[in-house]
Amino acid sequence: MLQQTQVATVIPYFERFMERFPTVQDLAAAEQDEVLHLWTGLGYYARARNLHKAAQIIVSEHNGMFPTDIDQVQALPGIGRSTAGAVLSLSLKQHHAILDGNVKRTLARCYAVEGWPGKKPVENALWEIAEKNTPDSGVERYNQAMMDMGAMICTRSKPKCELCPIEAMCEAKAQLRQTDFPGKKPKKVMPEKQTWFAILQHGDEVWLEQRPPVGIWGGLWCFPQHDTDDLRALVTQRIGSESHIAETEQLHAFRHTFSHYHLDIVPIRMQLSTLMNVVQESGKGQWYSLTTPPKVGLAAPVQQILEDLRYELNHSKTL
């Protein structure tokens, strides 16, 4: 959960997650929908899917015990070299270097390593430095200290150099170039895309479909999505008759930004005169109750729209 997400945000999610899945066996036996439901709001849902798959592998292939071999740990979904090294060094005192974002920043400044760490040659140089500096004994204290130092002292902006235990050997400090390291990611223009959500509603229920397991919002539940504004014709094909569509209106359009592009979302609501089967092109679909919502994983834009619909529904009942 802490990958790409701040501690303060993670804590309530972690507590709910551990209350529901206190053991790896509990997590492995769970349905993916429930895992994604408890993850809804944290983003980067591949983490949840990988965690679920890793739990199943640990139960089926490792007798429910977390592996202690670095290669076996790295073979688990979603675990790379640094995470594997952190787990084994902190828990078992095994000699492994780590290189998370905080450590990259600290080492890049201390040794004035030029370039963006996302480039392989720069990352390799930082790994070489990390390996060279990782002590044979006390590795668990060293790795924890390096992560903490990057998080609390050698911060991204306004580093607290006067408190840093390695200030005297820091090349960036000596050159007064702390903010130059690590190198910035090359800027590129974010592409813009547009999509339309078909919001089929009858009373307090709306139609949702589960996304394919891979790709954007993999495994999450979303409104039917199309790359054309001619939704009425498309929906008519799926419900059998246009006469079932009582009313059509465009809701507030908004932008959702991914790491690599902007997505402009135009929600079109179609009030249906009756609850009916919707022909599925693929995957699963269900009528989702706004008043008693099922425990399924939702894409962030979908959750936002559902909250607006729920507010509207509750407000109309008080009038």
Image: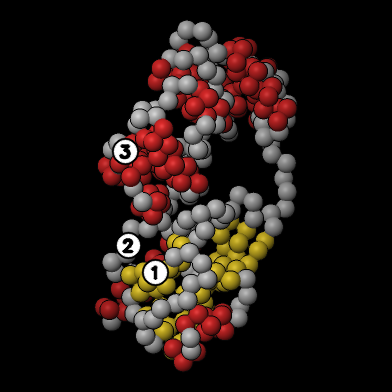
Residues under labels 3 and 1: Cα distance? 28 Å
Looking at the image, residue 271 sits to the left or right of residue 228; the answer is left
**Image quarter of residue 55:** top left
Position of 99 relative to 22 (above/below):
above
Mark 3 — residue? 25
The local crowd at label 3, few if under 14, some if 14 to 19, many if 20 or more residues have their Cα within 10 Å, is some
Farthest top residue?
137
Q: Looking at the image, which residue is at 62% across and 71% down?
A: 227
Query: What's the amino acid at mark 1?
Result: Gln
The local crowd at label 2, few if under 14, some if 14 to 19, many if 20 or more residues have their Cα within 10 Å, is some
Question: Which of the two labelled residues, at mark 3 and mark 1, occupies the earlier sequence position?
Answer: 3
Question: Which of the two labelled residues, at mark 2 and mark 1, occupies the earlier sequence position?
Answer: 1
- Report if residue 102 is visible in the image: no
Query: What's the amino acid at mark 2?
Result: Pro
- State the SS at label 1: strand
Q: Position of residue 178 (x, y in %)?
A: 65, 26
What is the basis of the colouring in this image? secondary structure
Mark 2 — residue? 294
Residues under labels 2 and 1: Cα distance? 10 Å
**Image quarter of residue 295:** bottom left
Q: State if disc 1 and disc 2 touch (CB < 8 Å).
A: yes
Query: What's the amino acid at mark 3?
Result: Gln
Numbered mark located on residue 132 in the image: none
Question: Which of the two labelled residues, at mark 2 and mark 3, occupies the earlier sequence position?
Answer: 3
